[in-house]
Amino acid sequence: MAIVVNMPRLSDTMEEGTVATWLKKVGDKIEEGDILAEIETDKATMEFESFNEGTLLHIGVQEGETTKVDELLAIIGDKGEDISGLLNGNGNASAEAKEETVEAESTQEAPAETAAAPAASAALPEGVIVVTMPRLSDTMEEGTVATWLKKVGDTVEEGDILAEIETDKATMEFESFQSGTLLEIGLQEGESAKVDALLAIIGPAGTDVSGVASSFSASAAPAKEAPKAEAPKAAPAAASAPKKASAPAPTPVTDNGRVFVSPLAKKLAEDKGINLTKVQGSGENGRIVKRDIENYEPAAAAPASSAAVTSFAVAGEEKTEEVKNSSMRKAIAKALGSSKFTAPHFYLNIEVDMDNAMASRKIINAIPDTKVSFNDMVVKACAMALLKHPQVNTTWSDNVTKIHSHIHVGVAVAVDDGLVVPVIKHTNALSLTQIGSSVRDLAGKARNKKIKPDEMSGSTFTVSNLGMFGIQSFTSIINQPNSAILSVGAIVQKPVVKDGQIVVGNTMMLTLACDHRTVDGAVGAQFLQTLKTFIENPVTMIA
């Protein structure tokens, strides 16, 4: 079954893309993971890989041509397959591209009789647009629908927010670039699918799109998406299963362990420590909704005469609960695991006298509408030190070491689902107050799941601070492709020696993790010495 590949959304602000280079031509065999083309977005030229296998049957956008997101880019299918139905149903394919495809296919002499029927059923009705799972970050491989903000039958205007989608970096709003009626939802809330899988179908009200949806589901089977496509069907079956008279039936659970629950109910359950598999859903198809969590009573789930004992009722009882890994959690595991086991880490520690920094901060914050934190001062000092030690501001690759002239400092921020690293661009050119404002703004966006991918990309150095938790010293894993990361501890008041006298002082421990492929011990030590000088004498950063 032929698969329509649409122009992907390679950034959250991307509205159209230009094909810079095709790396495959019509008739080439395509494997999952092959790079199909290089696509120029509003931010960069990026490689676009295939998530399907087959033969490249049609190229809808030639090199140098531009088309909107979700418009036809290419068609992949079986060699010799008749795709005339798909082309006739797509008004955006250029006549020139169609002629090339027809010529390429005419040399293969595929049996039209066997392919015509499925192709016709897959043809898009007039005015119908297939919306696929967008690529909302450059590392995104799959997305999870957190919340649908539209339902089937709703009118959709261009620019309306269709859904909130959880990526490997954040939960982001996904807006529609089409107008019409929402005819089909391909993924329910909580379900995941790979980039370019069916997300929704928009078109004129009353249009029958059952053939389009079913053809998309069938074509997704080779890409191992079938279990996810069948998930919504599993709910009614489970909900209709016979129930025991003595206790409410648990909520429906699919084969892959997913529980059907609304985002609000899921959040309430997490806050109250309720196991969702024990809750009976009263929503559509047995879905757990807010009222189910509010009315849940654990004690009522088991009869008093039962020999089984509820959770934690008996000392020594063993219990394990499985929690599905979020896309962000998977991304963190993949990135940090790769960094730890590919980059040879070494660590350097230095203690910093914070008396002058504390006095300077007090004076700065006395200015109306001004607020600077110690972390802002550390970030600024790092940027200044990187100017003097460019070898630390580098990226390793197999053939070359990239020495960056720009300085973009990433600041690690803890969020509910894990960790994100907003990036302060051109940090060395910013004042302390500008850095403080940027950090607060980006950290707020990150915690509210409103941060954009470009605001988390491009760092050349990273700062991680756990001092607010009372942690005095710790080591971090390098945030690749950076060559180093600074771990910042708490300011501690303790006896210190100054001018031969023991006095009360305020000190802070800094730990620098370095990639030994790009940063040698002496280079890292010199960087820390310079950093120490800037922090201990803040006036040098504004001189």
Image (spheres, helix red, strand yellow):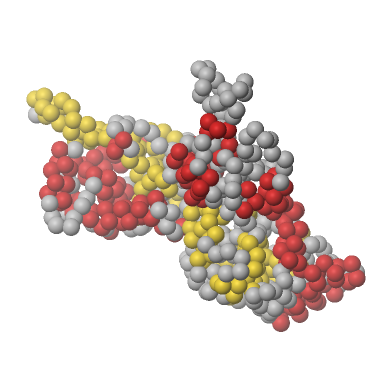
User: Which of 482/219 is in front?
Assistant: 219
Q: Is residue 492 left or right of residue 482?
A: left
Residue 141, percent from left and from top: 59, 53
Residue extending farthest bottom: 95
Residue at 29%, 37% (x, y): give it.
467
Q: Quadrant of residue 302?
A: top right
Residue 409, percent from left and from top: 35, 51
Total tally of numbered discs in the picture = 0
Question: In the image, is residue 297 above or below residue 267?
Answer: above
User: Which of 380/437 is in front?
Assistant: 437
Residue at 38%, 34% (x, y): give it.
475
Residue extending farthest top: 316
* Residue 4 showing in the rendered view: yes
Q: Is residue 196 left or right of residue 46?
A: right
Residue at 40%, 53% (x, y): give it.
448
Q: Is residue 189 left or right of residue 523?
A: right
Question: In the image, is residue 467 above or below residue 539?
Answer: above
Question: Which quadrant of the figure contains the N terminus?
Answer: bottom right
Residue 242, percent from left and from top: 72, 40
* Residue 341 showing in the rendered view: no
Residue at 41%, 33% (x, y): give it.
346
Question: In the image, is residue 109 above or below residue 442?
Answer: below
Question: Which quadrant of the figure contains the C terminus?
Answer: bottom left
Residue 534, percent from left and from top: 22, 45
Q: Quadrant of residue 123?
A: bottom right
